[in-house]
Amino acid sequence: MQNKYIKRAMALCDEFVQWQGKDGGINVEACPYLAEKYQPLFRFMEVPFMARALYRVYNITNVKKYKASADRYCLYYIDFVTGLYVDEGEKIAYKMGIALECIYLYANNNLSMYNKMIERAQPFIQCLEGLKTAAGCYFRCGYLPGTKGLENVPDVGFSDDLNHVGRGIARYHEMAGDLFTYKGILGLINYYLTDIEEGTMHGIWHPGLGTWAIGPWPDTAFEHMDNTPANAVGWVFSAYGVADFLLDAYEIIEDAGLKKKIANACIRSARWCFENCQFDDGALGMTGRDDKWLGLTATAVMYYIKLKDMELLSKKDDDDLKAGAVKAWDWLVCNTEPGNMPEAGYLKVTGNTKPVPGDNIAWLLAWTIEALTLGEKLQ
């Protein structure tokens, strides 16, 4: 039986289709979140998340325009990042990781192109080989923090950037099974399971918080907030995003002890989301109970369901996390009713976080679509 909330997901997918330009990317004039009001960065990292959501809804509904749009979004991003690497020499790790995820998505929805997509992956694999580092993060993100005084650190080391790399190489490893990606997966796992240590890049897990810090340095020059040192706070982008990678990696690795550590960290981080970021009405904030975010509330639903489906939860963990996930689902359902969705999927409470850049708003809407296709599992 089709999820009764699928029509809401389809309505958002219809917007993604309408935003698509002739080149397969986003038509800037068509997407309201790329208007000047939302201070977009035009990095287009939202495109693969939109494609992922479109493929998911296509595979439920068989509405062909969703697959056609997802195909074009994936190919656009692959070409876009290939151009940056080949023509301009840019080496930014998260873009390579997301491009690898696009390759995986496209190949798995167009099986006749599987081997061709493995070939398309090679420039990104080569770039990531050039970004290997002896620092704790295993791969350099490819740029430095933006805060003055941090020019001499090895790399920005953001947890969110590197989970895109992890997700990309894990999915490419599923396609090609090579040793380089397996070692990269293990290297990133180590970064995420090692405690953060001031003045180093040894690790990014923040034991005082029970989740991953945004970054290893006191950098304040990043998105959505001001004057917040990256090494002092967690945020739901990484709390869910890193777990999304680690739980994919869990299926790949064989070391039972490492698997247990992954499960424990992911469950702890899920608890951080619910215990520190969830409002009484079920909505989630970004770094705590700051402001209410539709797409981040969606991750609470997806997070719990992924842990549950993988049978990683004890009865107590299951009971505790399910209670938070049900509250998140109820808020998500209320705030995706036609005519009731908050502008940019954001409701100001403290104003400590802001709905900019607009690129990320489209990304969060894609997560909202995914959660809408899953939520009935809670019942």
Image (cartoon, helix red, strand yellow):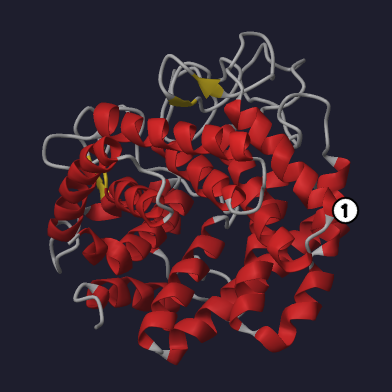
Percent from the top left, x then y, of residue 86?
Answer: 87, 59
> Can residue 156 be seen in this snapshot?
yes
Identity of the residue drawn at 34% across and 54% down: 305
- Secondary structure beneath dot 1 equals helix
Percent from the top left, x then y, of residue 116?
Answer: 80, 79
Identity of the residue drawn at 88% across and 42% down: 130
Identity of the residue drawn at 24% across and 78% down: 7
Percent from the top left, x then y, of residue 69?
Answer: 51, 81
Q: Is residue 305 left or right of residue 292?
A: right
Q: Is residue 303 left or right of residue 241?
A: left
Q: Nearer the viewer, residue 21 or 353?
A: 353
Q: Nearer the viewer, residue 11 or 248?
A: 248
- Asked if residue 172 is positioned above or below residue 108 in the image, the reply reads above
Identity of the residue drawn at 44% across and 21% down: 233
Residue 279 position by quadrant: top left
| Residue where numbered disc 1 is placed | 126
Q: Is residue 204 left or right of residue 212?
A: right
Percent from the top left, x then y, of residue 102?
Answer: 63, 66
- The N terminus lies in which quarter of the figure? bottom left
- Asked if residue 301 is positioned above or below residue 284 in the image, the reply reads below
